[in-house]
Image: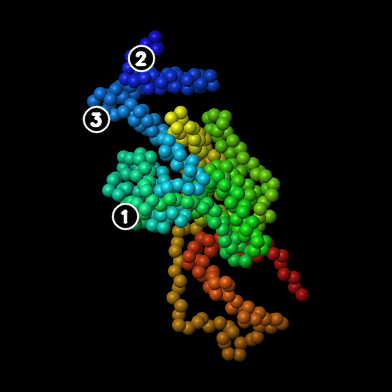
Amino acid sequence: MFRQKSFLIFSFGIALGALLTMGGGVLAERAARGDANNTIPFEGLKTFSEVYGRIRQDYVEPVADEKLLEDAIRGMLTGLDPHSAYLDQEQYNELKVGTTGQFGGLGIEVGMENGFVKVIAPIDDTPAQKAGIKAGDLIIRLDDKPVKGMSLNDAVKLMRGEPGSQIVLTVVREGVEQPLKIKIVRDIIKVKSVKSRMLEDGYGYVRISSFQSKTGENVNEAINELRKNGELKGLVLDLRNNPGGVLNAAVAVSDAFLEEGLIVYTDGRVEDAKMRFNATPNDILNGAPMVVLINAGSASASEIVAGALQDHKRAIIMGEKTFGKGSVQTILPTSNGGAVKLTTARYYTPSGRSIQAEGISPDVPISRVKLEAANQSEFAPIKEADLVNHLENGNKTLPKKDDLNKKDGAGKTPEESEEALALQDYPLNEALNLLKGINIMRQPAAKKN
């Protein structure tokens, strides 16, 4: 009876028979698990078949069955959440290449919001970042084509293209009255996920732009390289505008700074989605203080790292509230060479916090500000030492004038170097000052003679 009825309903193509067969297998699996809702949705399938048949028969132009079915699958996944999607063979291959650090495009991580493409974060040293694209921008046009009504996959396809070709993005930015037109020249995107340098003697800086398969190893290598300059007294870990990436890489980075305890756990409906990741011994910094910089462009894997280090009181989190992507996507290859990217779990910080749609709140909030150097007056301010007949200091040994004016490798005094960093990157300057303050408080009190 069931087979006869299904044949009548789905007389528009053999593919729909396969769809019923696949659906029956899923329903049988759900029944075996004891799911309450294991009935076959006949009415919904009947409606689907009616619409499918109308399109094949009445649409103004012929449409291939393969396209109709693929579009139906895309729509089914797009309706779940912003991160579930169907990937055709080309998109799946690009995803696999992207996690290794090289792919073609503009260099932005994007999602959908209210029908528009939203920039989660521009990737460092890419055409989008250099052109001025910022986290939070809403893309409303791609060249002359409105984004409204497009799927995310269609929008991404338009943004991709031959290296050297250009595209004009029309974006709406918070705080800017008129939409901005930003011209970007496409390029091959080669992402170096980890960069590092010394900020000052004893204070290191590590920037992670995305989490790739080898990011954990790269972070360890970067810190070992910094330690060649001497033991580190503190480290700034910069996760700003980091859109995330590979879960295992986030675990490896967190593990580098933790001695023990839970890093992150995931929870979903199936057993494979329930995972726990724990730290292993040896903190690469030997307990030296850390500051983690975050902002609204820090998402996913970045939030795992920030959340783990915050819950373990291993680092001070500074900056803005993060993006709030607390879900895990599993890539499930399909028989046609493509894949389904399906949200299968939420992840939780060691204390049990779900970050989904909430984000990580910083311990020390810093709003987006830009400093400008104050106008220097013609006359320097008067100090006690400038007064006539001022009382001498009284110390037996005074610092030499040459030491006070000692300059760094760039030819700047410490005061000038600090001012330059504050003007260039105010949050980073504040992170460095916080590390210095922590180390001052750790020093034993001076004893009186």
Q: Amino acid at mark 1?
A: Lys
Query: Where residue 71 sits: x, y (%)?
Result: 35, 32
Label 1 to label 3, Cα distance in Å? 35 Å
Query: Where residue 137 sits: x, y (%)?
Result: 38, 51
Q: Mark 2 highlights which residue? A: 7
Q: Mark 1 highlights which residue? A: 181
Q: Nearer the viewer, mark 1 or mark 3?
A: 3
Give yes or no for contact between labels 1 and 3 (Cβ–Cβ under 8 Å): no
Label whose residue precedes the other's in the sequence (2 or 1): 2
> From the viewer's perspective, is 26 left or right of 286?
left
- Residue drawn at the location 54% of the way across and 62% of the way down: 430
Label 3 to label 2, Cα distance in Å? 26 Å
> From the viewer's perspective, is 259 left or right of 152?
right
Q: Amino acid at mark 2?
A: Phe
- Residue drawn at the location 50% of the way across and 66% of the way down: 422
Total marks drawn? 3
Query: Where residue 284 sits: x, y (%)?
Result: 66, 53
The vertical placement of 82 against 72, above or below, is below
Q: Mark 3 highlights which residue? A: 61
